[in-house]
């Protein structure tokens, strides 16, 4: 997985960086300064004091994403992220007691409509229409008791910044930055959300996520190509599923499935909290124990056992659309912390980071055959073996075939010629500079600490990364390219302009 890092560095350059990035001095003893605690219920808590401003950044990572969904329930993790902003039994309501019977009726009608629609041609359209009318009336009645966006309002009125959430194949994350004297507000809200979420406007929001899919996939040629690229590259492993879900699954996602999902996966023993900023560690831990400690641990589902079979030959897919040409190439490879993953971080930078990188210089600057070129190590996730991916857009009148041929020549060069020492060191320096920038904020540190703790089980991956990266040699790069970047291990997706 590509990380914005770097290794050995001349002392004169180090002094300059210290002047530009004061946090570098603190970053050098990061492992010693991060305090890790595991509560009795299994919740992992990471605290890093940084008294540079009276603020704190807080990340909650649940080790669950689209990769953990059941067949028939794809898109559930992303949908749940939306619903977690609808409030709790005490937030977002004028009178929860009055909400309960209305919500119960809404749920029953919604389920009845779904059951009838699943019948397809055998379903009764008159029943569906009648129930839909009743459902809409109940939703109007319920909104008189619902206070929309109250969690957002509470945070905003208390000085919050960067309040948001994300769902990936691997993780679901909730994060916010606050004045450090507001940490108890955060603890009360987030502990309440873990235990008492209320799925208000469930069927309304289900339509929202389906519209989101139409915009980001169905109406977006690049989004559609990327979805087909992954589903072609992964024939068995759930990395081949879209985060938003398949349309037929999304249309019938249920409240019961969501409630079961949040109970199983948003459990404290499947969660990492990172707190970075102007805090006192004992006081912060006491606060977290007070609010999160009583949440009971849950038996976690069995680990995923489906492995992607070894690819035995090249896979190709072409999509014809009224859109600009696009090319996506992927090669299967190990995930972190496998040593080859560090090697591919360097290969990524050698090929496509910056204007002097090999692919950018040759395809964009010298030959003018590409409008853009990018490389990503770790598509679409990092918990399981993944792809080393290349994304390129040809510049007319050049096409994807020409682009693929030239990319292939640079891949072959990696296999045949060791990367010169000067180029390898320059690449390390670029990664190192990015790493320092990433550690210069509370939010960046909280992000990375919680990420590595949730994905690898050890936040110290962050502190050992530079050492491991520094051990990668030109021979390692050449051997990794020979081992993985071959035609038997290759998936290609091309978007071809539709001809009238």
Image: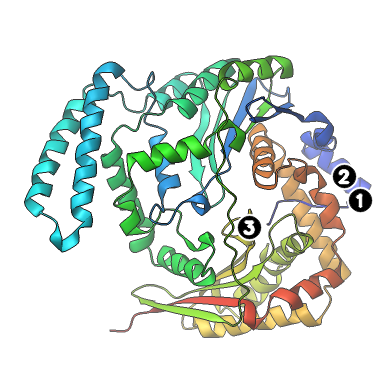
Q: Is residue 460 above or below residue 288?
A: below
Q: State which tag comes first along the sequence, 1 or 3.
A: 1
Screen quadrant of the N terminus: bottom right
Name the side, left or right, on which 136 lies relative to 282. Answer: left
Q: CA distance from mark 1 to mark 3?
A: 36 Å
Q: Residues within 10 Å of mark 3 (few under 14, many from 20)?
A: many
Mark 3 element type: loop
Q: Position of residue 94 (x, y in %)?
A: 29, 16
Residue drawn where x is 50% and y is 38% of the image: 264
Q: Which mark is residue 14?
A: 2
User: Image quarter for residue 135?
Assistant: top left
Q: Which mark is residue 10?
A: 1
Which residue in the structure is indicated by mark 3?
Answer: 384
Residue 443 drawn at (x, y percent) = 63, 35
Give the x, y percent position of residue 423: 82, 67
Mark 2–mark 3 Cα distance, whole angstroms, equals: 35 Å
Q: Earlier in the sequence, mark 2 or mark 3?
A: 2
Whether residue 94 is visible to the viewer of this picture, yes or no, is no
């Amino acid at each position: 997985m590509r990380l914005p890092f770097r290794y050995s560095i001349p002392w004169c350059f180090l002094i300059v960086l210290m002047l530009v990035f004061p946090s570098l001095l603190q970053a050098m003893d990061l492992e010693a300064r991060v305090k890790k605690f595991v509560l009795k219920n299994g919740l992992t808590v990471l605290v890093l004091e940084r008294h540079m401003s009276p603020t704190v950044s807080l990340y909650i990572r649940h080790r669950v994403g689209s990769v953990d969904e059941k067949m028939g329930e794809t898109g559930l993790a992303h949908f749940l992220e939306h619903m977690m902003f609808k409030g709790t039994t005490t937030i977002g309501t004028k009178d929860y007691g009055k909400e309960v019977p209305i919500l119960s009726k809404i749920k029953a009608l919604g389920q009845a409509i779904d059951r009838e629609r699943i019948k397809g041609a055998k379903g009764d359209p008159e029943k569906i229409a009648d129930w839909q009318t009743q459902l809409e009336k109940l939703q109007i009645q319920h909104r008189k008791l619902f206070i929309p966006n109250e969690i957002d309002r509470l945070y905003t009125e208390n000085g919050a910044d960067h309040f948001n959430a994300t769902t990936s194949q691997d993780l679901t994350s909730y994060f916010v930055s606050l004045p450090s004297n507001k940490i108890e507000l955060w603890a009360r809200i987030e502990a309440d959300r873990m235990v008492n979420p209320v799925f208000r406007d469930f069927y309304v929001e289900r339509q929202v996520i389906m519209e989101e899919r139409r915009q980001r996939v169905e109406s977006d040629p690049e989004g559609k190509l990327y979805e087909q690229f992954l589903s072609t590259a992964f024939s068995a492993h759930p990395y081949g599923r879209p985060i938003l879900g398949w349309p037929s699954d999304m249309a019938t996602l249920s409240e019961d499935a969501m409630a079961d999902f949040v109970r199983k996966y948003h459990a404290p023993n499947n969660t990492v909290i990172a707190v970075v900023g102007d805090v006192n560690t004992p006081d912060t831990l006491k606060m977290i124990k007070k609010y999160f400690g009583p949440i009971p641990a849950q038996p976690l589902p069995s680990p995923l056992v489906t492995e992607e079979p070894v690819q035995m030959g090249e896979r190709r897919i072409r999509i014809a659309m009224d859109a600009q040409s696009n090319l996506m190439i992927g090669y299967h490879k190990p995930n972190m912390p496998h040593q080859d993953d560090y090697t591919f971080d360097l290969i990524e930078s050698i090929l496509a980071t910056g204007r002097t990188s090999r692919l950018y210089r040759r395809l964009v600057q010298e030959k003018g055959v590409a409008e853009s070129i990018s490389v990503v190590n770790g598509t679409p996730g990092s918990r399981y073996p993944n792809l080393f991916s290349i994304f390129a857009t040809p510049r007319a009148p050049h096409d994807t075939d020409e682009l693929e041929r030239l990319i292939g020549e640079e891949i072959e060069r990696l296999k045949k010629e060791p990367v010169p020492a000067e180029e390898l060191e320059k690449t390390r320096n670029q990664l190192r500079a990015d790493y320092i920038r990433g550690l210069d904020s509370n939010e960046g540190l909280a992000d990375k600490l919680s990420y590595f703790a949730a994905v690898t089980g050890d936040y110290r991956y962050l502190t050992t990364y530079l050492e491991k990266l520094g051990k990668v040699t030109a021979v390692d790069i050449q051997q990794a390219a020979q081992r993985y970047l071959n035609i038997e291990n290759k998936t290609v997706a091309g978007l071809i302009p539709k001809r009238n």
